[in-house]
Amino acid sequence: MGTSRTEEELAELEGTQVLVSTEGYRQYVESEFQGLQEYVFGPNPDVFQSEVYNLESLMWAFGILRSRTFAPYESEAIALVPGLDLVNHNATSLAGWQGKGGGGGIFGGNEKAGTLRSSCEIVQGEQVYMKYGEKTNSQLALDYGFVDDTDNSGAYLLSLGIPEDDPFFDDKADISELAGLGENFQFSLYGGRGEPDPEMLAYLRLIQLSGTDSFLLEALFRDRAWQLICNPVSQENEGNVCECMISGCRDTLKGYPTSVTEDEGLLRSSNLSDRMRIAVTSRLSEKRALLSTMAYFEQLKERLPYMEYYQERRLKDLGLLDDNGQSTYDDFFKDGIA
């Protein structure tokens, strides 16, 4: 039996976040269909004919729904807003959706309402675009069926979590909660943007806190712990952060069947179908972000011996080190203080 077109296209997504998320969507829809089939469709075949109410139709409906939903209101993850789904995405668009809930409905009740506003002039007859939020190409491909061809830097969603077997799990989870994150959090890696998200660096330091650095987890420091780890804690801790990120990026890159050079060559080809082009662009975007992130932490690792850490900052606060890192101990005694 030959390989189907869909299987070939999915093969192009090997190693990508798109494929993992697609599988998650598929399992979710199949589970929902089984429940509907057992309790609704099956018992009422005269009303819900199998030619229409089947798994394939539900898959189609789910895909259409996902491609028409946004996050227009702060209190909701996604919503279906008639009219808004007609506005196409453009990453450089200055138009944005301002949503509000209650008291502002177009029918004068408590309906939620909003306004699509542009901060630049729009010429009459020109198509209106909006930005679908800070989404990676993998997210755009999964939910909306297109990619941003202008994104040459790449993006990757990194999920981080405090290991449950960490001996300091409870303390770290508490500090993370106080910072508004939690035991698990997702950060975006972008290629070509220099230093990663400072909040992600702090979270990585928290995860890697161990040994003598674990004193920062004590209750005495609880209210200040997050603020303290927003800066390098120790050379060992910062080194563990670098090793973790370098090895993680390297291992993830091994999961892709092609190289960046091969993907770039494919995109220059005119033989790719639209769906194949989306697949190649998605995996290339992920790889560029991972390579850029790995390069950043490799460079950071080389700078570790020359960086300032918590102990040096603390001694400076106490006046025992000057701005050049030199001890003020001798001056302390020259002033006649014993």
Image: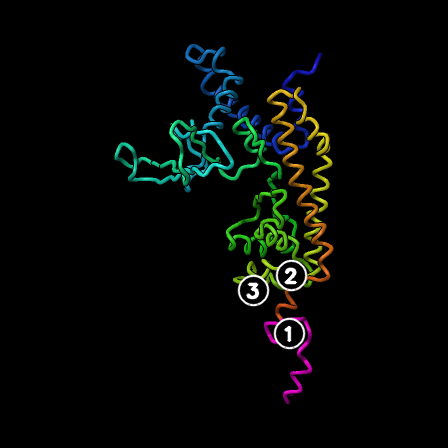
Magenta span includes 316: yes
In the rendered image, which residue does mark 2 sit on?
233
At 64% across and 48% down in the image, what residue appears? 163
Q: Principal SS element in the magenta part? A: loop
Mark in the foreground, 3 or 2? 2
Magenta-highlighted residues? 315-338
Q: Earlier in the sequence, mark 1 or mark 3?
A: 3
Rounded to the nearest angstrom, the CA distance separating label 3 from label 2 is 13 Å
At 46% across and 16% down in the image, what residue appears? 41
* Vertical side of 194 occupied by 50: above or below: above
Q: Secondary structure at mark 2?
A: loop
Rounded to the nearest angstrom, the CA distance separating label 1 from label 2 is 19 Å
Q: Position of residue 151 (x, y in %)?
A: 59, 36
User: Which label was assigned to residue 335?
Assistant: none
Give the crowd class for mark 2: few <14, some 14-19, many >=20 residues within 10 Å. Answer: many
Q: Secondary structure at mark 1?
A: loop
In the rendered image, which residue does mark 3 sit on?
221
